[in-house]
Image: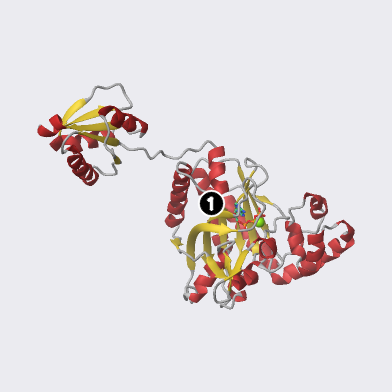
Amino acid sequence: MNDILPGVANTWRYLESVVQDIVQSYGYEEIRLPILEDTDLFKRSIGEVTDIVEKEMYTFEDRNGESLTLRPEATASVARAGMTNGLLHNQKQKLWTSGPMFRYEKPQKGRYRQFHQFNVEALGYDGPDIDAELIIMSARMWQRLGIGKIRLEINSLGVPESRARYREALVGYFSGVKNRLDEDSIRRLEQNPLRILDSKNPDMQEIIQAAPVMLDYLDDESVEHFAGLKALLDAAGVPFEVNPRLVRGLDYYSRTVFEWITDALGSQGAVCSGGRYDGLVEKLGGRATPAVGWAMGIERFVALYEACGGESPLTVPDVYIAALGEGTQARAFALAEELRDQVAGIRVEMNLGGGSFKSQMKRADKSSAAYALILGEQELSQDRIGLKPLRSGDEQESIALDDLAAVLQGKLSGA
Ligand code: ATP
Ligand code: MG
């Protein structure tokens, strides 16, 4: 679990604000959810025989003996919140949420125990058009931020009926090579053979590569849905690859699944992953509600942005106010507030803790401010202030206090 330190947090806030603006502009609305839920919610939604539920959840009993779990992902909570708040009753929802998720993983680069996701979920929509919109919206994020080095893989997992036929084929295939399966996979062979395809064990990859693929078992409607999605992505100019082995690590997916993958970050290359989960709400006890969404891992997103040469706008002060001598600090405080009122967006930092002229100017310089404002007793008695450019060799000027806001406004807007 990482501390996100000043500087780095600045990049986070910038990237978060960009993605929030984009999804809001597509008509998605924020929902904020608790980070604790009943353990049962995740068992029922993610599936008992998955990495997350079997080995990654932070689960504990509260004082009342109820089993609670720190959320390992957000989709189950969104579905739960939609149901318990009546948001899915005869209405559709386009939602986004973000925050920390918790999984007891083996920590490594790009894989942490507390990590953060930005999630987008659309509930009540059944066509491939919304699947396409969600993907196109993520493509816009990469484009807006100058992120290259990322590719899109898509697949279809069909519906429960076609998946049952595929499951049989998988059991047949994996039973034939049972002596080469690892312990996890042997256990999953009976309980959840699809999960074998999501194995992270390198020794299993050859066997997995030769397994039957879901696309050969798709039902007609899923074929049509998938074709619809591909046509819309083509029309939007969003390139993709069909990866018939893409399954995703959670049980609730149906039909469309996709992943944005990068090779720029080493082995943890999935930056944004999602898919359709038409059966989830019903499985949780609600009315059947088609739904689709994606989750972006913010740590990986930040790392990829930096790997692509991205920088965040620095938040340095525009002016640093130094005050020297009797009565000047109180006046400087008032002046700072006046500037904050009158100059839109200005960043003003006050010198705090007094100090000599030299030490205040040192701090002003260290703050990276563009200008120092210097208020001494003599200036104050004449209702003037010194304005010293810190990033150029220009001379210090003396400005009438009455003109200060207008002068700064002009300088900061480059006039
Ligand atoms: P993997 O197969 O790599 O374990 P997953 O299927 O468990 O991934 P999801 O549950 O789909 O991943 O999570 C969505 C996104 O969240 C991933 O694409 C990734 O960017 C990010 N993510 C998942 N787990 C972690 C983690 N432990 N640390 C950092 N980011 C993570
Ligand atoms: Mg995982």
Amino acid carrying label 1: it is Ser
Residue in view at x 79 percent, y 55 percent: 208
Q: Is residue 413 visible?
A: no
Give me the residue at 82% from left, 66% from top: 171
| Residue 116 against residue 338 in the figure, above or below | below
Element class at badge 1: helix
The image quarter containing residue 175 is bottom right
Question: Percent from the top left, x then y, of residue 293?
Answer: 56, 61
290 and 335: which one is in front?
A: 335
Task: Mark 1: give few (<14), some (14-19) or many (20+) Cα within 10 Å.
Answer: many
Q: Residue at x 10, y 33 (%)?
A: 381
Vertical arrangement, residue 167 with respect to residue 389, above or below = below
Where is residue 252 shown, x and y percent of the image?
A: 64, 67
In which quadrant of the rendered view does residue 291 lie? bottom right
Residue 288 spot, x, y in % from top left: 58, 75
- Rendered position, 130 above or below 374: below
The percent coordinates of residue 143 (x first, y second) are 51, 44
Q: How many marks?
A: 1
Q: In front: 88, or 226?
A: 88
Residue 348 in sight here:
yes
Instruction: State which quarter of the image contains the C terminus.
Output: top left
Residue 22 versus residue 76 in the image, above or below = above
Q: Residue 197 is drawn in which quadrant? A: bottom right
Residue furthest toward the left? 382
Q: On the rendered structure, is 10 left or right of 350?
A: right
Q: On the rendering, which quadrant does ligand 2 occupy?
A: bottom right
The residue at which mark 1 appears reads as 138
